[in-house]
Image: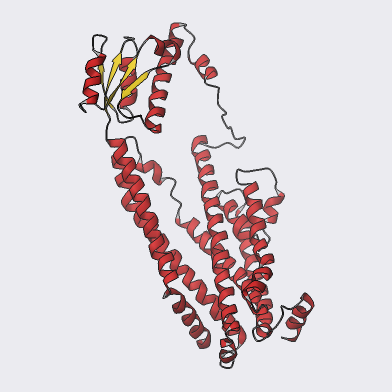
């Protein structure tokens, strides 16, 4: 195993010292954090500034209710009566003594139309908040005058679908929230697994191809067996990937711990405890790590075999197409069932080892399959890793020293038998 460790260390250090690794691992997350921080800062400033407004209530009916409704979302509204002079308010706005003011009149009561007067056009968020508040209160006032009640209001607004599970649960809303959260986490994990297996598998292919093209492997192979060289490469690239993901996870954790309380403290109505309920537990991350490790070894072996059988990047680009399709097909199938479906056969398709990382992990997180199916998929993947490594090792042993045209399927079968 000392030879494997030497290759692992070399592959690992060669990659973590490159500019591409440093930029991709450190600079990009820091840039994303900076952009997110800037957006959060702007959003917080926007929610905390220019919120002192006046409200002119010519209706004499709904002004106080509208001001109270807008107060719940962080606005400070001063209600003024009919005797106010709009010219004086306009002057205050022009002289920057007042940000703007809202005008409610008889048309507001009958059609929900109102005016917002200011020097600058209101943003989309402010328009949506104001329209919602005024519309709701004006509609309530109109319905009250004709003595209809909430039933007509619900019908006017278009009604809504209420999901009722045939399985009895103590808290239906909590169960539905958990289901939606599981779907979101599953989709995010599937996307993560799809990208990382494709990315790090391509790294293995490029490493094998570069050594074969530069004839370096002809020297290395004299001191180490091909299978150990292959194992060292796969482990070295995998260690680099784990390092990269560890740094990204640490950055995400620090951002969550620092930014979440600050945002919750500045935005009215934000409930940090409620947000914490949707943070996945350690079991989800352990399951994600298991699927990543098995999936990586599964696909890295295939990519290494592709690199060994090819002599140029053009040939490798064509030869790796079947391997890529083994990732693309389950991703497409998973997208078709992302919102849940009654296609039970999809759960059995997810047991296929090459499809399991992308298809079984989301199902396990969403708890849409029994636990034994998740465990069985991991067992199948482990068995497939052994079989794929054996097959890739035999192809690698012969192909790493072969030059010339890409071998046919018959020649590959001969390599496997002779190796």
Residue 402 vs residue 244, the one in the foreground: 402
Horizontal relation, residue 34 to residue 192: left or right: left
Q: Residue at x 56, y 62 (%)?
A: 291
**Quadrant of the frame with the C terminus:** bottom right
Horizontal relation, residue 26 to residue 322: left or right: left
Horizontal relation, residue 90 to residue 399: left or right: left
Report x, y in % for residue 199: 55, 65
Horizontal relation, residue 411 to residue 29: left or right: right
Report x, y in % for residue 164: 58, 32
Q: Residue at x 31, y 35 (%)?
A: 268
| Vertical relation: 15 (above or below) 109 | below
Residue 248 vs residue 20, the one in the foreground: 20
Toward which corner of the image does residue 68 lie, by quadrant? top left
| Vertical relation: 14 (above or below) 322 | below
| Vertical relation: 99 (above or below) 342 | above
Residue 198 vs residue 387, the one in the foreground: 198
Report x, y in % for residue 389: 64, 76
How many numbered discs sit on the rendered protein? Answer: 0
Toward which corner of the image does residue 232 lie, by quadrant? bottom right
């Amino acid at each position: 195993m000392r030879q494997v460790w030497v290759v692992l260390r070399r592959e690992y250090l060669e990659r973590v010292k490159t500019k591409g690794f440093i930029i991709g691992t450190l600079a990009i997350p820091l840039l994303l954090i900076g952009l997110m921080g800037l957006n959060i800062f702007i959003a917080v400033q926007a929610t905390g500034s220019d919120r002192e407004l006046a409200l002119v209530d010519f209706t004499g009916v709904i002004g106080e209710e509208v001001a109270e409704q807008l107060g719940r979302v962080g606005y400070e509204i001063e209600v003024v009566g009919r005797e106010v002079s709009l010219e004086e308010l306009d002057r205050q706005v022009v002289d920057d003594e007042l940000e703007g003011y809202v005008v409610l009149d008889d048309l507001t009561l009958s059609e929900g139309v109102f005016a917002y007067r200011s020097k600058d056009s209101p943003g989309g968020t402010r328009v949506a908040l104001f329209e919602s508040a005024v519309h709701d209160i004006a509609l309530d006032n109109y319905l009250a005058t004709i003595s209809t009640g909430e039933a007509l209001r619900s019908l006017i607004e278009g009604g809504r679908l209420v999901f009722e599970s045939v399985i009895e649960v103590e808290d239906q809303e909590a169960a539905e929230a958990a289901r939606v959260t599981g779907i979101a986490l599953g989709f995010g994990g599937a996307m993560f697994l799809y990208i990382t297996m494709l990315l790090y598998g391509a790294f293995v292919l490029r490493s094998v191809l570069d050594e074969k093209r530069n004839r370096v492997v002809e020297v290395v192979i004299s001191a180490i067996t091909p299978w150990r060289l292959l194992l060292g490469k796969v482990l070295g690239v995998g260690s680099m990937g784990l390092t990269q993901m560890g740094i990204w996870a640490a950055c995400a954790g620090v951002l969550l711990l620092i930014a979440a309380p600050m945002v919750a403290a500045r935005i009215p109505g934000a409930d940090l405890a409620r947000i914490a309920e949707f943070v996945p537990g350690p079991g989800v991350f352990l399951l994600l790590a298991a699927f990543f490790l098995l999936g990586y070894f599964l696909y890295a072996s295939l990519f290494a075999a592709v690199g060994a059988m090819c002599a140029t990047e053009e040939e490798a680009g064509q030869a790796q197409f079947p391997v890529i399709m083994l990732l693309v097909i389950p991703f497409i199938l998973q997208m078709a069932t992302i919102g849940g479906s009654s296609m039970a056969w999809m759960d059995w398709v997810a047991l296929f080892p090459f499809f399991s990382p992308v298809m079984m992990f989301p199902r396990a997180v969403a708890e849409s399959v029994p636990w034994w199916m998740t465990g069985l998929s991991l067992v199948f993947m482990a068995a497939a890793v052994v079989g794929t490594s054996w097959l890739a090792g035999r192809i690698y042993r012969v192909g790493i020293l072969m030059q010339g045209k890409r071998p046919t399927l018959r020649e590959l079968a001969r390599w496997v038998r002779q190796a």
